[in-house]
Image (tube, coloured by chain):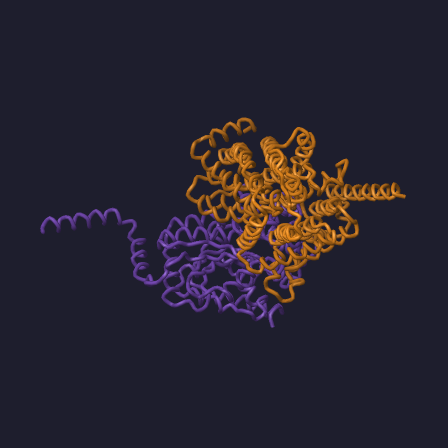
Chain colours: A purple, B orange
C-alpha cells in the first residue's frame, strides 16, 4: 500500500520535473483529447490548397499540417487543387466539398475577390467559415539599389509619376491587390504609372532585378534573397503599422496620408459551411494547438511572414476577418467593380 | 571558391551513405514517376515534399532534384512503348520512338534515350559547375521582349514539325493557339472562351490534352486495325542501339544537350519547350526530313537529351539567384524555404556546402539513373509481347488514372477523351498533331510577353529592335522562314 503511494508520488515528481516546460502544450493536448468527437476523424483530413505546390501558401499549409499532426495524432494530407488562379479550388470548397470535416481549406484572403467579383452568384463568402488565423504578409514596394530610382523615397517616386506620367514601370498582377494599390495611389495623387502585367509577384521581382521594370511589389519572403544581397531596397509597406523587423521602412499611409493603403495576404483556415459544430471546434483546436507550438511560429518567421496582432489574439477570428473582407468590398464598390 | 574546390566540397558532402541513399531513392522514384503517365515530376515532388522536412537540406534537395531529372529518363518509356507520354517533356518522343517500337526497335529507342539523357545531363552539369554565376548574370536580364523573341523562334520551329500538307499544319498551329486562349486572360484577368464554365476558366490542361491526343488516339487506331484483323506484329529486334544508330545519334545528342541547357536557363524555356525545339531542329537539319515521324532515331536522341539538360539548366537561376524558371523548380525553392534557406545571389558563397552538394548529387544521380535504366530496357521491351487486347485496357486505365491524379479533376477526363476522339479523326484526315501541341505550349508566353513588351514600351513595337537579343532572335526566325520558302519553291520546281 505504502509502496504504491510512494511510487505514485515519485512518478508525479518525475513527471512534474520533465513536463514543466511542456505544461502549456500538455494542457492544449489534454483539452484537444477532451474535445475530440467520438466518431471523428476516422480517416485522414484533407487540407486543400488552391495554389501550386511550393508557393507561399503551400509552404504555410504543409508546415501547419506537420504541426497539427504532431499535436493531434491525426493524419493530414495536403492536396493542391489548382487552376484559374485559385478559382477552381475556392469553388470546390464552397460548392462541392462535403461538410463532414474531412475537407478543410488553407486559404488566403484572395478568396474574397473571387467570392465578390468572380463567383457569379454560384457561391459566396459565407459558404466558407473561417476557423483559425495563421499569418499575414503585407505588400511592399521595392526598387533596385542602382539605376534611376536608386535611393528614391515613395514621395519622390509618386512626384516623378505626376511630373512625367506613364514613365515609371511598375510590375502588377492584374485584377488583384498589386493592381489595386497602384490604382489607389494614382487616384489620390494624380500620378500615372506604367503598369506592366505579370502572373505573380515573384515574376515582377525578377523583372525588377533584371532592369525590366522600375518598381516591383512583393512580399518579404519573395525578395529576401535580393535584399540580403543588397540588390533591392524597400520603399514602403502597405500595412497599418511599420513592421517590427524593418522600423525604417515607412507605411504608405504615413507617406501619402490616409488609411486606405493596406494590402496584405492574410492566411487562414476555413471549413465548408455546415460542418457539425463539434467537428469544427475540434479542427480549430488542432490548428490552435499547432499555432501555440513555438517551433511552428519559428518556422513561419523563418519563411518571412508576420502575425497580425489583431487576428492572432482574436477570440472571434471569423468576425474579425469579416471586417477586413468588408473593407475590401467597400473598395470594390467605390471603384465600380461591384454594384 | 573556384569550381574544382567547390566540387571537392560537394562530393565530400554527398558521398556519405545517408546522402547517397536519398540520391538513389530519388532516382528510383523519379524513374517510376517518369514511367507512369500522368504522375509527372511536379505531382511527385508535391507528394514527397513533407518527407524532406525531416531530412537535412542536402539530402532533401538531392532526393527532390534526382526525382526531377529521373522523371526525364523514365518519361520516354511509355512514349516509346505505347505512345503515351510519361510526362509532358516526352511528348515528341512519341513521334518517332513509338514508330521505332512498331518496327521492333523499342530497345534501340530506349537505349538511345537513356544514353542521351546521361550524356546531356552530365555535359550540362559540367557547364553548370563552371559557368553558373556568369550564366545567371545574363539570364536575369531576360525580360518580356527577349521572351517574345524566343517564343517567335519557337513558333517558327513548329513550322518545321509539319510533315504533310503545309496548309493543314498551319491550321493545326492556329488551332493550338485557339485552345491555349481558353481560360483567364493573362494580362487583364478576364475570362475568355469559357462560356461561363468554371472548369474551362482554368484553361485546357496540357497533360489531359497530350494523353488524349497521343495515348487515347493511338488506342483507338490500334483497336480499329485489330478489328480489321491486321495484328500489330511487334517482332523485337535487338535490345541495344546498333553502331549505325550511334552514328546517327551522337550529333543530335550533343545539339540537344546544348539547346536544352540554354532553354532550361531562360524563363520561357524548360524541359517541354526544349524537347520540342530539339525535335524541330533535328528535322530541319536532317538530310532526309521525310524519315521523321516514321522511326528516325535522331527524333528520339535529340529531344530526350534536350529535356535532361534543360533540368540542369533550370537549376542555375534557382540556385544562383533564387529564381524558379518553371513550376518544378518553384517547388524546389519551396522545399528550401521550408528548411529556412532562402536562395538568392548570396547563396553560393554563403552555403557552398549546400550548393556544391546539390551539384555533386546531380552528377551521382545521373550515374545511378543510367545504371538503373539500362537493365530495365530488357524488361520494358518484353512488355510489348503482351497481346494488344490485354495491353490496351491496361494502357487506357493508366491514361485515366494518370490524367485524374494530376489535378483530381473529373473534367480533365472529359478533356482527355474529347482530344482522344478529335485526335483519331485528325489522324485519319492526315493532320499533324505535334504542331498543335507545341503551339498550345508556347502560346500563353508568346501572348503574355508580346503584350507586356508593348505595355513597357513608350514607342510600340520598336522595343523589339532596340533590344539586341530580341532583334537577333527575330532575325534568326526570319532567316529560317526564308530558308523554308526556298526549300519549298525548289521542291516545287523539281516536280515541274
Q: Is residue A230 visible?
A: no
Please indicate whether residue A135 sits to the left or right of residue B445 in the image: left
Q: Nearer the viewer, residue B268 or B256?
A: B256
Q: Tell which residue pokes out farthest to the front in this image.
A: B229
Give the position of the C terminus of chain A as an image quadrant: bottom right
Please tell me whether residue B162 is drawn above or below residue B363 in the rendered image. below
Q: Position of residue B169 (x, y in %)?
A: 76, 50
Taking the spot 43% from the left edge, 58% from the top edge, the residue there is A309
Quadrant assignment, res A134:
bottom left
Q: Is residue B435 visible?
A: yes
Q: Nearer the viewer, residue A8 or B249?
A: B249
Please tell me whether residue B335 is drawn above or below residue B130 in the rendered image. below
Taking the spot 58% from the left edge, 60% from the top edge, the residue there is B411
Q: Tell which residue pokes out farthest to the right in this image.
A: B496
Quadrant assignment, res B320:
top right
> How many numbered discs, if any?
0
Q: Position of residue A270 (x, y in %)?
A: 45, 62
Q: Nearer the viewer, residue A280 or A253?
A: A280
Q: Nearer the viewer, residue A262 or B17?
A: B17
Please indicate whether residue B167 sits to the left or right of residue A93 in the image: right
Q: Tell which residue pokes out farthest to the left in this image.
A: A2
Q: Position of residue B190 (x, y in %)?
A: 65, 62
Q: Position of residue A275 (x, y in %)?
A: 42, 67
Please indicate whether residue A73 sits to the left or right of residue A118 in the image: left
Amino acid at each position: 500500500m505504502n509502496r504504491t503511494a510512494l511510487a505514485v508520488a515519485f512518478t508525479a515528481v518525475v513527471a512534474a520535473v520533465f513536463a514543466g516546460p511542456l505544461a502549456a502544450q500538455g494542457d492544449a493536448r489534454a483539452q484537444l483529447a477532451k474535445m475530440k468527437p467520438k466518431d471523428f476523424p476516422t480517416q485522414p483530413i484533407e487540407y486543400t490548397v488552391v495554389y501550386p505546390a511550393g508557393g507561399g501558401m503551400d509552404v504555410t499549409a504543409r508546415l501547419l499540417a506537420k504541426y497539427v499532426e504532431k499535436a493531434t495524432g491525426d493524419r493530414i494530407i495536403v492536396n493542391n487543387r489548382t487552376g484559374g488562379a485559385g478559382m477552381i479550388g475556392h469553388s470546390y470548397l464552397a460548392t462541392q466539398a462535403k461538410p463532414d470535416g474531412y475537407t478543410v481549406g488553407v486559404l488566403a484572403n484572395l478568396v474574397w475577390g473571387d467570392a465578390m467579383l468572380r463567383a457569379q452568384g454560384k457561391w459566396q463568402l459565407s459558404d466558407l467559415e473561417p476557423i483559425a488565423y495563421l499569418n499575414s504578409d503585407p505588400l511592399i514596394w521595392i526598387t533596385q539599389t542602382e539605376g534611376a530610382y536608386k535611393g528614391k523615397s515613395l514621395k519622390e517616386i509618386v512626384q516623378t509619376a505626376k511630373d512625367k506620367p506613364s514613365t515609371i514601370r511598375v510590375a502588377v498582377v492584374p485584377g488583384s491587390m498589386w493592381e489595386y494599390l497602384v490604382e489607389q495611389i494614382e487616384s489620390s495623387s494624380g500620378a500615372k504609372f506604367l503598369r506592366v502585367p505579370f502572373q505573380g509577384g515573384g515574376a515582377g521581382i525578377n523583372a525588377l532585378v533584371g532592369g525590366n521594370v522600375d518598381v516591383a511589389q512583393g512580399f518579404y519572403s519573395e525578395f529576401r534573397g535580393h535584399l540580403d544581397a543588397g540588390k533591392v531596397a524597400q520603399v514602403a509597406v502597405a500595412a497599418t503599422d511599420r513592421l517590427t523587423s524593418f522600423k525604417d521602412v515607412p507605411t504608405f499611409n504615413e507617406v501619402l496620408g490616409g488609411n486606405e493603403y493596406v494590402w496584405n495576404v492574410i492566411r487562414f483556415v476555413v471549413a465548408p459551411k455546415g460542418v457539425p459544430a463539434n467537428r469544427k471546434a475540434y479542427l480549430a483546436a488542432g490548428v490552435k494547438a499547432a499555432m501555440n507550438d513555438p517551433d511552428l511560429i519559428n518556422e513561419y518567421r523563418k519563411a518571412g511572414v508576420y502575425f497580425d496582432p489583431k487576428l492572432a489574439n482574436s477570440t472571434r477570428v471569423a468576425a474579425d476577418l469579416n471586417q477586413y473582407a468588408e473593407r475590401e468590398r467597400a473598395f470594390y464598390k467605390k471603384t465600380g467593380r461591384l454594384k | 571558391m573556384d569550381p574544382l574546390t567547390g566540387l571537392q566540397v560537394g562530393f565530400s558532402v554527398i558521398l556519405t551513405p545517408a546522402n547517397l541513399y536519398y540520391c538513389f531513392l530519388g532516382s528510383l522514384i523519379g524513374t517510376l514517376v517518369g514511367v507512369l503517365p500522368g504522375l509527372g515530376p511536379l505531382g511527385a515532388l508535391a507528394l514527397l515534399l513533407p518527407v524532406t522536412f525531416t531530412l537535412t537540406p542536402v539530402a532533401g534537395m538531392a532526393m527532390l532534384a534526382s526525382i526531377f531529372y529521373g522523371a526525364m529518363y523514365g518519361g520516354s518509356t511509355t512514349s516509346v512503348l505505347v505512345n503515351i507520354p510519361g510526362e509532358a517533356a516526352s511528348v515528341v518522343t512519341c513521334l518517332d520512338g513509338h514508330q521505332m517500337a512498331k518496327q521492333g526497335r523499342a530497345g534501340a529507342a530506349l537505349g538511345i534515350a537513356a544514353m542521351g539523357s546521361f550524356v546531356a545531363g552530365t555535359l550540362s552539369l559540367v557547364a553548370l559547375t563552371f559557368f553558373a554565376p556568369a550564366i545567371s548574370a545574363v539570364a536575369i536580364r531576360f525580360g518580356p521582349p527577349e521572351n517574345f523573341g524566343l517564343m517567335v523562334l519557337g513558333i517558327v520551329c513548329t513550322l518545321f514539325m509539319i510533315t504533310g500538307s503545309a496548309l493543314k499544319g498551319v491550321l493545326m498551329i492556329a488551332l493550338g493557339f485557339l485552345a491555349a486562349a481558353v481560360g483567364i486572360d493573362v494580362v487583364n484577368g478576364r475570362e475568355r472562351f469559357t462560356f461561363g464554365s468554371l472548369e474551362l476558366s482554368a484553361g485546357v490542361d496540357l497533360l489531359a490534352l497530350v494523353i488524349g491526343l497521343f495515348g487515347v488516339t493511338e488506342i483507338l487506331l490500334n483497336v480499329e486495325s485489330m478489328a480489321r484483323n491486321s495484328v500489330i506484329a511487334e517482332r523485337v529486334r535487338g535490345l541495344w542501339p546498333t553502331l549505325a544508330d550511334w552514328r546517327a545519334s551522337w550529333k543530335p545528342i550533343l545539339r540537344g544537350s546544348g539547346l536544352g541547357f540554354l532553354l532550361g536557363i531562360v524563363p520561357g524555356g524548360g524541359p517541354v519547350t526544349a524537347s520540342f525545339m530539339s525535335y524541330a531542329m533535328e528535322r530541319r537539319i536532317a538530310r532526309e526530313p521525310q524519315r521523321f515521324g516514321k522511326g528516325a532515331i535522331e527524333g528520339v536522341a535529340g529531344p530526350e537529351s534536350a529535356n535532361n539538360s534543360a533540368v540542369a539548366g533550370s537549376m542555375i537561376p534557382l540556385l544562383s539567384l533564387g529564381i524558379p524558371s518553371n513550376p518544378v523548380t518553384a517547388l524546389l525553392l519551396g522545399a528550401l524555404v521550408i528548411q529556412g534557406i532562402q536562395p538568392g545571389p548570396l547563396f553560393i558563397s554563403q552555403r557552398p556546402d549546400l550548393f556544391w552538394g546539390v551539384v555533386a548529387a546531380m552528377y551521382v544521380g545521373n550515374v545511378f539513373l543510367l545504371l538503373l535504366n539500362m537493365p530495365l530496357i530488357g524488361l520494358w521491351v518484353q512488355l510489348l509481347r503482351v497481346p494488344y487486347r490485354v495491353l490496351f485496357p491496361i494502357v487506357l486505365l493508366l491514361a485515366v488514372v494518370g490524367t485524374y491524379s494530376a489535378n483530381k479533376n473529373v473534367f480533365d477526363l472529359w478533356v482527355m477523351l474529347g482530344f482522344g476522339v478529335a485526335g483519331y479523326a485528325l489522324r485519319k484526315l492526315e493532320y499533324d498533331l505535334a504542331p498543335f501541341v507545341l503551339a498550345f505550349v508556347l502560346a500563353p508566353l508568346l501572348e503574355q510577353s508580346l503584350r507586356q513588351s508593348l505595355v513597357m514600351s513608350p514607342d510600340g513595337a520598336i522595343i523589339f529592335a532596340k533590344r539586341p537579343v530580341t532583334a537577333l532572335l527575330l532575325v534568326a526566325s526570319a532567316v529560317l522562314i526564308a530558308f523554308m520558302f526556298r526549300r519549298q519553291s525548289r521542291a516545287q520546281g523539281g516536280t515541274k
